Image (cartoon, grey):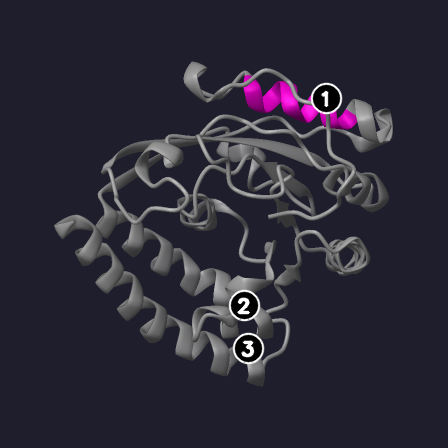
């Protein structure tokens, strides 16, 4: 628990120290990317305190020109810290609404244009996806977790259709992202950290104009599965009709 206590202390300090200027600048300069830029320092500091070492593959696919939709599997809250340091500063996340209630951290997300979404509420989920589509039309990349929530056991779960409907509407390249090891480092429902390596692999962008929603879902899943560790793969499950992400 010493590692966990240390990491939580560092996370709290960094959230206040970096979240405060992020909120102030974002209020003074709407549309600023300061939250993502400071978020890189915030994420690297938290990962270092947690003893988590991130390795990346396919970074050229993360930083290409123009907006794109990143679709990643979701094992742990650590996934966000792993992704933020290597995504373009203009990127915005679609994240569960409860994160926006966290002092300093949540405030900076809200004023910076990150997109809250509520699980289990179809109408509001669609409204959130419409806001995400507007963000993409402004030229910003967007990150979604199509499983809809963190995996309880580290294995890939079924995908929600909403993320893929959004990708088709946006008409921008879709980048599958496979995140491995974060479920072992910090499982949902526990604060026990297990230091060690994690990996994020960015696949080549997919052209959404070549797919319908179901086919795009299958293509993204295939790209993610092939990059996961064997124990993180799961038998394909039928996709859910729900539209929430995270």
N-terminal of the two: label 1 or label 2?
Answer: 2
N-term mark: 3 or 2: 3
Q: Is residue 144 above or below residue 104?
A: above
Image vertical order of residue 228 relative to residue 177, above or below: above
Q: Looking at the picture, tell me which residue is in the foreground, 132 or 194.
A: 194
Q: Which residues are magenta?
A: 216-225
Residue that numbered label 3 is attached to: 26
Q: Are marks 1 and 2 in contact (CB under 8 Å)?
A: no
Which class describes the residues within 10 Å of circle 2: few (<14), some (14-19), or many (20+)? many
What is the distance, in whole Å, between disc 1 and disc 2 at their CAs? 31 Å
Q: Is residue 141 above or below residue 211?
A: below
Q: Is residue 223 within the magenta segment?
A: yes
Which label sits on residue 218?
A: 1
Looking at the picture, how far across and down is residue 176, in whole percent? Answer: 61, 31
Quickly name the residue at label 2.
100
Q: Secondary structure at mark 1?
A: helix
Residue at 86% in and 31% down: 209
């Amino acid at each position: 628990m010493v590692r966990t206590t240390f990491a939580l202390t560092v996370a709290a300090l960094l959230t206040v120290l970096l979240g405060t200027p992020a909120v102030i600048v974002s209020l003074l300069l709407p549309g600023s990317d300061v939250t993502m830029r400071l978020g890189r320092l915030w994420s690297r500091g938290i990962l270092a305190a947690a003893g988590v070492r991130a390795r990346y593959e396919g970074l050229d696919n993360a930083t290409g020109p123009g907006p794109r939709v990143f679709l990643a599997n979701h094992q742990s809250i650590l996934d966000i810290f792993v992704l933020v340091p290597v995504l373009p500063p203009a990127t915005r996340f679609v994240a569960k609404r409860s994160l926006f209630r966290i002092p300093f951290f949540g405030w900076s997300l809200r004023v910076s244009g990150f997109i809250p979404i509520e699980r289990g509420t179809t109408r509001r989920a669609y409204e959130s996806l419409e806001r995400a589509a507007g963000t993409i039309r402004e030229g910003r990349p967007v990150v979604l977790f199509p499983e809809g929530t963190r995996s309880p056991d580290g294995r890939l779960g079924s995908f929600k259709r909403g993320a893929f409907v959004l990708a088709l509407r946006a008409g921008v390249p879709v980048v599958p992202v496979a995140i491995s090891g974060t479920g072992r480092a910090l499982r949902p429902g526990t604060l026990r950290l297990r230091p060690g390596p994690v990996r994020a692999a960015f696949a080549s962008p997919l052209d959404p104009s070549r797919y319908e929603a179901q086919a795009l879902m299958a293509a993204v899943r295939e790209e993610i599965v092939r990059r996961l560790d064997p124990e993180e793969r799961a038998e394909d499950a039928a996709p859910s009709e729900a539209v929430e992400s995270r």
